[in-house]
């Protein structure tokens, strides 16, 4: 018997995928995002040393995060909506674009997918030369941070502000490209390119979060400092997403003023 409670009617009268399929897609997409993005930061950004010009650097890491969203979005976005980020889920809910009943399960699936990805990365890093995992752990395991744990030494206020602003921008873009009047087929590409831009801006400031699941995943292996600061990268992105969701309709409505017929 089909799970009609987990498969609500879509706008065209068809049923959306069952909840288990949507949650699996969210876990998979978040896994890909963390594994690809954090994996690039851990394994390739300075390979094998800072002096080696083959290292992909911050630009490569930014592209890696963006490309993961493009790939996962096209692969499973049609199943779950392609959030892969608790902040996106919350922003869409506040905007009235996502049902309350699915917020908790989506967030749980995203956190699980991210944790599985960082755990896999921990095993892979541990299989490198002697001391590889210790060095990655000591450096924060690609975690986000402020103060002395910020790549550029930025303080808590600066980090909080950049996370709120960039997450709001990210959610505004997502709400725009997923609107029923938007051009079809370019959503994952636009969202991925926007995430790349966001990383290019914020990597020197805090390593870039805009995604609590990504920050929780890497903090699990980043040591006490990363775990002690992860609250910022949960609350600030959620605040930015909620701000965007709350203000989107008022700022970007397509309603035209009424003009009387003559």
Image: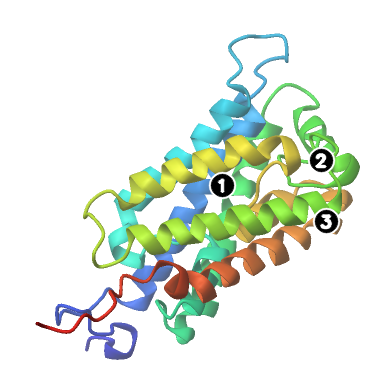
User: Sequence-wise, which precedes: disc 1 or disc 2?
Assistant: 1
> Mark 2 highlights which residue?
150
Circle 1: is it few (<14), some (14-19), or many (20+) Cα within 10 Å? many
- Screen quadrant of the C terminus: bottom left
Instruction: State the separation of the CA atoms marked 1 and 2.
Output: 19 Å
Q: Quadrant of the N terminus?
A: bottom left
- Which structural element holds mark 3? helix
Residue 200 at x, y percent in the picture? 59, 35
How many neighbours does mark 2 have within 10 angstroms: few (below 14), some (14-19), or many (20 or more)? some
Disc 1 versus disc 2: nearer the observer: 2
- The foreground one among 202 and 111 is 202
Specify the color scheme.
rainbow
204 with respect to 201 (left or right): right
Answer yes or no: do the residues labelled 3 and 1 have beta carbons within 8 Å?
no
Camera sees residue 221: yes
The local secondary structure at tag 1 comes to helix
Q: Residue shown at 23%/64% (left/top)?
A: 181
**Where does residue 115 sit, x and y in percent of width and height?**
62, 56
Residue that carries the numbered disc 1 in the rendered image:
34
């Amino acid at each position: 018997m089909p799970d009609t409670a987990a498969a609500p009617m879509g706008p065209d009268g068809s049923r959306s995928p069952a909840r288990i399929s949507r949650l699996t897609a969210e876990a998979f997409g978040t896994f890909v995002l963390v594994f690809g993005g954090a994996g690039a930061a851990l394994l390739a950004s300075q390979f094998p040393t800072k002096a080696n010009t083959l290292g992909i650097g911050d630009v490569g890491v930014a592209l890696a995060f963006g490309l993961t969203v493009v790939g996962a979005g096209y692969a499973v976005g049609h199943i779950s909506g392609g959030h892969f980020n608790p902040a996106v889920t919350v922003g869409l809910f506040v905007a009235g674009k996502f049902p309350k009943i699915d917020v908790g399960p989506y967030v749980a699936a995203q956190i699980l997918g991210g944790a599985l990805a960082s755990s896999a990365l921990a095993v892979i890093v541990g299989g490198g030369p002697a001391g590889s995992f210790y060095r990655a752990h000591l450096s924060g395991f690609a975690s986000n941070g402020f103060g002395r744990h910020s790549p550029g030494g930025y303080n808590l206020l600066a980090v909080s502000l950049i996370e709120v602003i960039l997450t709001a921008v990210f959610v505004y873009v997502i709400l725009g490209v997923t609107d029923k009047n938007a051009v079809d087929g370019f959503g994952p590409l636009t969202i991925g390119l926007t995430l790349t831009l966001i990383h290019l801006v914020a990597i020197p400031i805090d390593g870039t979060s805009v995604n609590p699941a990504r920050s929780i995943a890497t903090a699990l292996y980043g040591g006490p400092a990363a775990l002690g600061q992860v609250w910022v990268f949960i609350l600030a992105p959620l605040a930015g997403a909620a701000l965007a969701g709350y203000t989107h309709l008022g700022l970007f409505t397509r309603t035209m003023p009424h003009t009387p017929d003559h």
